[in-house]
Image (cartoon, rainbow, N blue to C red):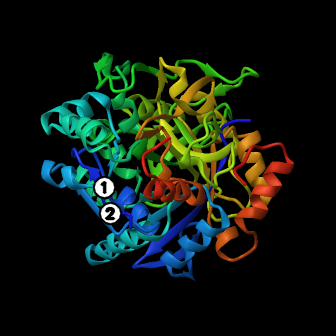
Amino acid sequence: MGLAKRIIPCLDVENGRVVKGVNFVDIRDAGDPVEIAMRYNEQGADELCFLDITASHEGRDTTVHTVEQIAEHVFIPLTVGGGIRAVDDIRTMLNAGADKVSINTAAIHNPELVRESAQRFGSQCIIVAIDAKRVDDVEGQPRWEIFTHGGRKPTGIDAVAWAVRMAELGAGEILLTSMDRDGTKNGFELGVTRAITDAVEIPVIASGGVGTLDHLVDGVIQGGADAVLAASIFHFGEYTVPQAKAYMAEHGIEVRQ
Amino acid sequence: MTGIVAVIDYGMGNLHSVASALEHVGASEVVVTHDADVIRQADRVVFPGVGGIRDCMSEIRRLKCDELLTQALTEQQVPVLAICVGLQALMSRSEENDGVDCLDTIPGEVRYFGKPLTDAEGSRLKVPHMGWNEVHQTMNHPLWAGIPDMTRFYFVHSYYAHAWDRSLLAGSVQYGVNADAALARDNLFAVQFHPEKSATAGLRLLKNFLEWNGQC
């Protein structure tokens, strides 16, 4: 027995409401983030992830307020991502009560941000989010590339090499989302999950595509993920966190129950 | 009455969650401060910490938090809870940041988890040690009251403490090595994990701290 694999419900939040996009497009309203965070906490979620998809500046103040409210009521680790562009944004979120921040596009534009923020705040609170899409090479060998702008904009960056570089710069964890799978409910893209978990020393959170409890098991056993993140299967009441943990435990995965 | 709880702030990160967790379990007044006068009047002291040990130690010394801590432990003799890097700072020295001298309150060292790190079956273990792991309670202590042995707490660290005097060990955790998860001596209790992030079990430990009279 030892360290448990983590289950992380993810709240996509826009203007103070939890929403869930299918392939980042079709948005359904799913409720109040503080209530939902408290529900997952009571269910025994191991951590919470809060992704801010608000575009406007005013909306971002709402986000800070929501993070403060969650941190007052929920005593498990809280990650905040979305719109983190500078050291000041990280400080704002940590001061609001986030334990970790997730940096995505800003790391691509300025990798030094990862080094600087890890040095300043500690690696333990710097997560680099990677949105990867499968783009096989000419011989048909699997390769994954990083995309930005919700999966629309290719960067030419190899996802596995990028994860290694981010870990070297001081990232404490990788949040890996498969853009081919996100919102599909077809399961994680296990190829890229395994490639990245094997390539880096730091923990990897698998994300994107969870539709069944078998997908969570596959992410850990086949993908090698240290944590699995899911949104809609929990938001819409298809499964509870205890059901997910019981199922993972039946399949030989160590979980916190 | 829990009295005034002073959370020592040496500027190395957000202490909001420690303070709000203490308030959640009934602390009547929590002050986040490095003001010597406030800490001198506190009924309990929390010594937290996140970040790199070199920066932490230099801020602890610059703000004279080392003297405040010694005073709380030996003169005021109030209950003191150290958390995470707070525990590591109490040891003699740390391997982190090319080697840093620490407070030597608890003789011992802070070591890197090692590369490659593997479990008993030879599987690779990631560093940092991040997540919920089982704490084996190696001592009966008021801070463990109502918390079953092998309860999981939330850890996040790449370095671990090893006290020379093994009679001070209050809890241990297995992660490739046998690491000190909790150390206790007189009115001091120090934990490597984050009780403020460890859900029900962590809140219970903080509640136990508020009710503790500082005796083992």
**Residue A20 visible in the displayed image:** no
- Describe the element under mark 2 as helix, strand or loop: loop
In depth, the one of A193 and A48 nearer the eye is: A48
Name the one closer to the observer, A38 or B116. Answer: A38
Residue ID at (75%, 56%): A245
Does residue A22 appear left or right of residue B214 in this picture?
right
- Kindly identify which chain the residue marked by label 1 belongs to: B
Q: Is residue B176 above or below residue A65?
A: above
Q: Position of residue B82 (x, y in %)?
A: 39, 41
Q: Are marks 1 and 2 on the same chain?
A: yes
Mark 1 is on which residue type? Asp
- Could you tell whether B61 is left or right of A27 in the image? left
Q: Which residue is mark 2?
A: B3
Other residues around mark 2 within 10 Å, as few (<14) / some (14–19) / many (≥20): some
Q: Label 2 marks which chain's residue?
A: B
In the rendered image, which quarter is residue B130 located in? top right
Location of residue A31 in the rendering, given as x and y in whole percent from the top left corner: 54, 82
Q: Secondary structure at mark 1?
A: loop
Q: Are marks 1 and 2 in contact (CB under 8 Å)?
A: yes
Is A116 rendered above or below residue B213?
above
Q: Position of residue B189 (x, y in %)?
A: 45, 40
Q: Position of residue B49 (x, y in %)?
A: 34, 42
Q: Quadrant of the N terminus of chain B?
A: bottom left
Residue depicted at x 49% and y 22%: B162
Mark number displayed over residue B43: 1
Q: Amino acid at mark 2?
A: Gly
